[in-house]
Amino acid sequence: MFSPGSAQAAISAGSPCKVAGRERTVKGVTFACRKVNGKLVWKRKKFATIDDVVTTRVLESAALASGASAVVEVALSRGGSTGVIVSRSQDGLSAFRANCTHQGFPVTRVGKVLECELHGSQFDPATGAVVTGPASRPLLRYEATESDGSIFVTVRPA
C-alpha cells in the first residue's frame, strides 16, 4: 500500500522517479526528477545560494531535549531553503548545514555523533568538527539562539 512517508524515504540520487521537474526535499537535501539517458531519475540539486542574513524560528524549545538533534528547513530570502541540523548539548545549542562536507549528503544524529548517510563521516554535534572521515572539513556552522520558548537559527552567506 502506498504511503507518502515511505515514498520520500526511498528518494536518493539515481533512483527512479515518475514526473520530470518534480522536486522533493529529504533530510535537508533537495532532489529534482530529471531525464538522464532516456530514464527519469532523481538528481541532487546544488545547494541554495545564501545571499542575505536570515533568522528563522525553527522549533519550540521543549521539542529539543538535551543530547538530541533535529533537521529543520530554513527558508531563504530569494527562494529555496537550506537544511539545518540543530543540536542541544549540556553546553547549549548548535546549528550546522545538514550536509556533509565530503559530498553533500545529509547528516543525521546517530547516537552521540552526526553521521553522513553516504560514506559514514562523523561530526561532533556541539562543534561540527570531523570525528571520523572521509570528510576533512567541519560542518558549516550557523548561529542558534533560544528566546521566549523558541529556538531560532540565523544563516549567513559563507
Image (cartoon, rainbow, N blue to C red):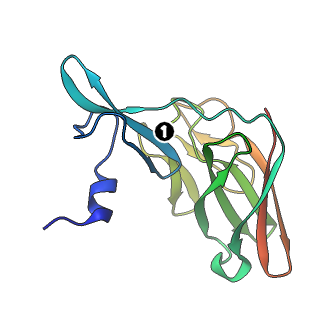
Residue extending farthest top: 37
Q: Is residue 103 left or right of residue 16?
A: right
Whole-percent x and y of residue 103?
Answer: 51, 29
Q: How many marks?
A: 1
Q: Nearer the viewer, residue 72 or 129?
A: 72
* Residue designated by label 1: 105
Q: Residue at x 76, y 45 (%)?
A: 141
The answer to whether residue 132 is above or below residue 83 is: above
Mark 1 element type:
loop
Q: Residue at x 48, y 52 (%)?
A: 27
Residue 120 in view here: no
Q: Nearer the viewer, residue 127 or 54?
A: 54
Whole-percent x and y of residue 77?
Answer: 74, 44
The quadrant holding residue 102 is top right
Whole-percent x and y of residue 1?
Answer: 12, 68
Q: Looking at the picture, which amino acid does disc 1 mark?
A: Phe
Residue 30 in view here: yes
Q: Residue at x 75, y 58 (%)?
A: 94
Whole-percent x and y of residue 89?
Answer: 73, 68
The answer to whether residue 134 is above or below residue 90 is: above
> Which quarter of the rendering shows the C terminus?
top right
> Mark 1 Cα within 10 Å, few/some/many (few <14, many 20+)?
many
The quadrant holding residue 62 is bottom right
The quadrant holding residue 66 is bottom right
